[in-house]
Amino acid sequence: MGYGAAGAGGQVRPRAFISYAHDDSAHVEKVETFYELLREYGVDARIDLVAAEEPQDWSLWMEEECAAADYILVIASPAYKLRGDRKENRAGVGRGVVWESRLLRSEVHQDDRAWVKKILLVVLPGRSKEEFPRFFGGPEITRYLVPTLDETGATELLRYVLKKPYRVPPEVGTPPPDFGTRRPQVPASQEPGAADESPEGLDEAAWQQLAALLGGVQPESWSEQAYQWSFGTAGRHGRAAAPFGTPDGDLYAWAEDLGERRHVPGTVPKPVAFAHALAAGYAAGESPADRRRARALALWVDRFLDGRGLPKLPEAPGIRRSEATLTVRLTDHPQRQDRFYVEIWLRTTDGRQPRRLQPPEDAGSLAVDMQGARDLLGDCMRTLSQALTDGEGVGATKLARIEFAVSEGLLEEAFEQWTLQLRRGARPIGKLYEVVVRCPDQRCEFDLPLLWSRRWDWLTRQNGQDERATVRVVDEDVTCLDELIGKWRENDYPVCVAVSVSPAREGVYAALDAGMPVVVWQREGLRGDPAVPPLTSLLALDDVAKLPDSVAKLRRNTQVPDAARASVVLLWDDPTNPPGADPLSDATLIA
């Protein structure tokens, strides 16, 4: 297949036409982000949104784009399936998809084998593999899942379109003159099948325990590394060639797939090696839920190996998480209330040490007003890709969270509304990333560091759904906050306080004085708005570990009024990851 567009330096770029339906504004925004991602990574992508900047004969435009494209990327959605199947009953609605699907249907029928190389079925976040017209076939036709709109999520698709496969067949060598004979895998004195009670090496009890650990747990971007590692390393007894791709389903389904593969008696079963590698991956994460799962998997692996008399497994190499966090630290200026000393730190989960991006590490401290802090964050974001890759390849790490470490006076600042200037306009950071606040300087006195750490340790050991994890502070509790603080300090739980009082400030301060690492509340200026529902109506509080993700999803939910989305503040203060250096002092600051 020849590519049609030449890029910088004469390098030829593949041309891709994006065929999709305008289901709603949220879906169109995802498709546009996907389009921008493709172009950023070297694909000459084409989309109607850009073509609409000029007058068009749309039927001719669609025909020409389909004919000129090296690839046609069909985006799954309910409206695309409805219109492609000719079931749209509203007159004049979705005519673009109807026309494009007619062209694609013709191409499928003309060559029922070659079309799958050009017409690629793409599933963006929140969509389903079933949301394609019937003429594209069923599950036997490849679907490209893009779970996240970044290079990591689109890796499989980008590798195919850019002709950069992960695996290539090795050169075929010369056969040896004498192959020899196969070494028996079972000793002659041992009856066949006696080495294991089941072909996969795990008995029923072990499978039940593994199902409790991995059932319903969806794979993450790094999970394929664990799956590949479970097949062993070159030269290891029992090592097998890893297959292309990964199974469908949750992580337990992946383990079942491994269990169905050949197992050499006397070696560690592949599902156990998989659990061991997953434990290493989860241990590298920052989420309490990840660390808890890592402990549980490691304990299961150890018990299985000890019970079978098998040797300990080596450390799983190369199981690397790819998340990053930016910490914006604002310290009050001792003389000027409108200025702050600012530092911006980058922390990753791939083993690198945290480092200060702004001001540069060889420079002095920097005092700015709030707008200056916004501008400095924008400067960091524009050069962030270089800091994230650090010479290890584009997209090696993705930014997941921005946290603001501030004094108590800034806790209600609407940081998630700060905007980033992207190619097609400004977008609030709260709609792109998890945004949380921290208040570490309030943890430095008396026994608060100990309480803070012990509560976080409890959260990583216990299930975030434990009924003891969260307490709610309502208006009736305002007169007895001192009593509540004393009660909370008696145990390592609760770890989260949901404040539903007005003003919220007193409840938040009480939570900080009890060493709470997690506090969630509604901003004072918005809580009284008739359009703003109570906190418990906006946010599920039944799993503390999921709160950063839950708040991020709330801020993106266009079905919720703007004032309600902007009302929620989440303090998420992980004591195991201090925000940069020690607190700034006057002696180290320069204006």
Image: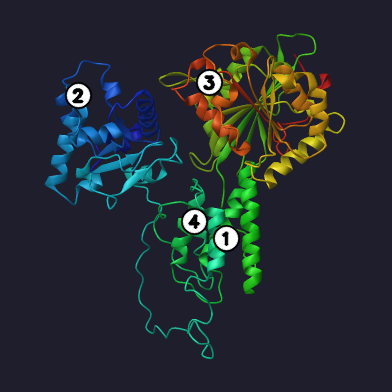
Q: Identify residue for label 2.
A: 90
Could you tell me which secondary element the residue under label 3 belongs to? helix
Specify which label sits upstream in the sequence, 3 or 2. 2
Distance in Å between CA atoms under marks 4 and 3: 35 Å
Q: Identify residue for label 4.
A: 252
Could you tell me which secondary element the residue under label 2 belongs to? loop
**Quarter of the figure with the C terminus:** top right
- Residue 246, compared with residue 14, is above or below; it is below
Q: Is mark 4 in CB contact (under 8 Å) with mark 3?
A: no
Looking at the rendered structure, the kind of residue marked 4 is Tyr
Q: Can the viewer see residue 527 in this picture?
A: yes
**Quarter of the figure with the N terminus:** top left
Identity of the residue furthest to the bottom in this view: 189
Instruction: Please state the horizontal and vertical placement of residue 407, each as a whole percent of the image.
Output: 74, 20
Specify which label sits upstream in the sequence, 4 or 3. 4
Q: Identify residue for label 3.
A: 565
